[in-house]
Image (cartoon, rainbow, N blue to C red):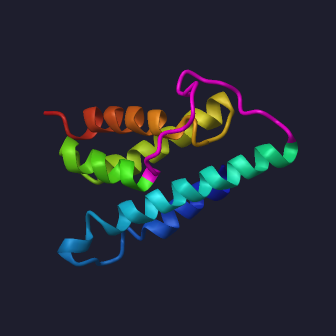
Amino acid sequence: MAMIRSEVFKSLELGASLGKSDVSETPLLKLSWILERSILKNEKLLVWRGNYDPVTIFHGSKAPPNMTVTQYMERILKYSNCSPSCFVIAQIYMERFFHKNGGYLTSFNAHRLLITSIMVATKFLDDK
């Protein structure tokens, strides 16, 4: 988890000077890439170890959605009108959830956990 956390903050380059059109897209694309990479790595790890991911309230019981995490994040950004910083805070919430409760980010829990984390982050940051 510590490695993923440092990757997220280093790769987002939030302190770098970006053009105005790049501010909302570049960090989100990098964040979605990191989440998708984490999902693949965690699923390979679970298969290799022969372990099963502990089932949480965020696990889907059927096959994972056909939409990738990147497509899902783009859709949330398009229709929710939340600020891009909510996605970064949502990532922090997800890391805290797994650190406290155990488990791994997989394709069976990523979408539900992501939308819940973004909703809480939006309530914290964007509500007036």
* Residue occupying the point 35% across, 76% down: 16
Q: Quadrant of the C terminus?
A: top left
* Residue occupying the point 49% across, 62% down: 33
Q: Is residue 85 left or right of residue 58?
A: left
Number of numbered labels in the structure image: 0
- Is 98 situated above or below 43? above
- Which percent across, then down, holds residue 68? 46, 51
Secondary structure mostly taken by the magenta-highlighted segment of the chain = loop
Q: Nearer the viewer, residue 11 or 68?
A: 68
- Is 45 situated above or below 111? below
- Is 23 situated above or below 104? below
* Residue occupying the point 45% across, 50% down: 69
- Which percent across, then down, holds residue 75? 29, 48
Q: Nearer the viewer, residue 91 or 125?
A: 91
- Which percent across, then down, holds residue 9? 49, 61
- Is 108 situated above or below 41? above
- Which percent across, then down, holds residue 118? 35, 39
Q: Residue furthest right?
A: 49
For the record, the magenta segment spans 50-69
Q: Residue furthest left?
A: 128
Magenta span includes 29: no
Quarter of the view holding residue 127: top left
* Residue occupying the point 39% across, 64% down: 29
Q: Is residue 128 left or right of residue 32?
A: left
